[in-house]
Amino acid sequence: MNIGIDIDDTIAKTSEETDIYAKEYTEKVLKRKFELKKIEILDPMWARHLYGWSDEEDKNFWNLYYEKVMENVKPKDDAIEIINELSKENNIIIITARWDRESGIISEITKKWIEKYNINYDKLFIGHLDKRDIVKENDIELFIDDSFKTCKQISEIGVRTFIMDSRINKEMKDDKLERVYSWKKIAEKIKEVN
């Protein structure tokens, strides 16, 4: 089976890492109190909504901290072990919306991060907000992501889709999406199919 998997907030705890730098940025650079808003967000550029930043403040944050967040993010519990177990009988295709800089540094950071954590995979696609074409071209049969919008798009083309629960998609529902709360739950659901 071909399995498509997102990185940020699916394999990795990106929101948690972003929070650390967002707090530093808000308090030290913007000189404001740091607060997390409790809202549902469809926009993949969720940080400005969650932290209450203007577009300019958001752009400045990512210019200052993007590489640090991507380098220092930690894997979710059990993600690596389960992905590596799945890779023994399935093709793992990692598809991330991470955008790259002209220097190509984010691609390099991403590849080094995957290597650092010894994640087995067959293909890697970086910089894709709309993942439907990659899913079709690679005959992906199962897709895992945290973005409600992306999961909805993928399920609408007939692919079984797991939405990884997160603080910004918690209340969003769609009957075609199977919500998962952990990598152990993903492993259980995949065993049910096989």
Image (spheres, grey):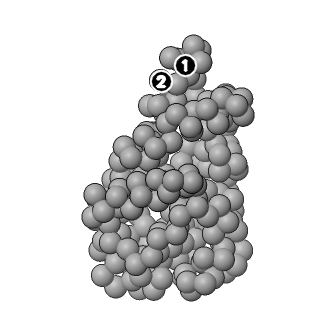
Locate the N terminus by quadrant: bottom left
- In the figure, 31 relative to 118: above or below? above
Q: Is residue 93 left or right of residue 173?
A: left
Kindly indicate whether the residue at mark 1 contacts the one at mark 2 (C-beta within 8 angstroms).
yes
Residue 182 image position (x, y, % from top left): 41, 57
How many numbered callouts? 2
Residue 130 image position (x, y, % from top left): 67, 66
Q: Amino acid at mark 2?
A: Glu
Front-lying residue, 129 or 171: 129
Q: Earlier in the sequence, mark 2 or mark 1?
A: 2
Q: Assess disc 2: are there few (<14), some (14-19) or many (≥20) residues with their C-alpha within 10 Å of its C-alpha.
A: some
Tell me the mark number nearer the camera, choosing from 2 and 1: 1
Residue marked by disc 2: 24
Q: Is residue 22 left or right of residue 175?
A: left
Front-lying residue, 184 or 85: 85
Look at 58% across and 71% down and name the residue there.
Answer: 161
Q: Residue furthest front?
A: 103
Residue 143 image position (x, y, % from top left): 54, 72
Query: What SS does tag 1 mark?
Result: helix
Q: Amino acid at mark 1?
A: Val
Q: Assess disc 1: are there few (<14), some (14-19) or many (≥20) residues with their C-alpha within 10 Å of its C-alpha.
A: few
Look at 70% across and 78% down and name the residue there.
Answer: 157
- In the figure, 35 relative to 154: above or below? above
Residue 87 falls in which quadrant of the image?
bottom left
Residue 193 image position (x, y, % from top left): 45, 82
Look at 59% across and 18% down and name the residue there.
Answer: 30
Residue marked by disc 1: 29
Locate the C terminus by quadrant: bottom left
Q: Is residue 30 left or right of residue 77?
A: right
Label 2, label 1: how far apart the Cα atoms are: 7 Å
Front-lying residue, 104 or 179: 104
Res. 129 in view: yes
